[in-house]
Image (cartoon, rainbow, N blue to C red):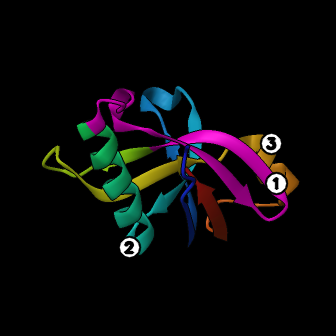
Amino acid sequence: MTLTEQVDHTGVLWRWTGGSGSGTWHFLTIDGAAGEALSGTAIMRKLEGSARGFGSLKVRARIGTTSFATSVFPSKSDDGSTGQVWLLPVKAAVRRAESLAEGDEVEVSLEY
């Protein structure tokens, strides 16, 4: 039996641009209690031998009425270590459907 966990989080949508303008992506930073919960699950999966590449976790995200499958990725700090901060990519189709722009406060629900 697979247990599904859920966390809710509110954060600000921000944009990252690749080197030499090679592309832009929009993210929501998942930190605080939600980040701690994701980190706990990641540690358990690593111990079980079911960890994914880059330490990512598959999630089902819901923003407004839009639900989508994606992965969250641990954020690396300046010293290269990963902590309890995760990044959720928010694709253009979701931003259009929910009328979101960079700088907007976004409420997200994650199931994992």
Find residue 66 and name its label.
Answer: 1
- Indicate which disc, 3 or 1, sits on the residue closer to the N terminus: 1
Q: Amino acid at mark 2?
A: Gly
Q: CA distance from mark 3 to mark 2?
A: 27 Å
Image coordinates of residue 91 in percent, x first then y, are 69, 42
> What is the count of numbered marks?
3
Q: Are marks 3 and 1 in contact (CB under 8 Å)?
A: no
Whether 35 is drawn above or below 105: the answer is above
* Residue 20 location, quadrant: top left
Task: Give the residue furthest to the front.
Answer: 1
Q: Amino acid at mark 3?
A: Ala
Q: Which residues are magenta?
A: 48-72
Image coordinates of residue 100 in percent, x first then y, are 76, 61
* Residue 109 location, quadrant: bottom right
Can you identify the residue that label 3 sits on?
Answer: 93
Residue 71 part of the magenta-drawn span:
yes
Q: Residue at x 84, y 50 (%)?
A: 96
- Indicate which disc, 2 or 1, sits on the residue closer to the N terminus: 2
Image coordinates of residue 63 in percent, x first then y, are 73, 61
Can you identify the residue that label 2 sits on?
Answer: 32
Q: Nearer the viewer, mark 3 or mark 1?
A: 1
- Indicate which disc, 3 or 2, sits on the residue closer to the N terminus: 2
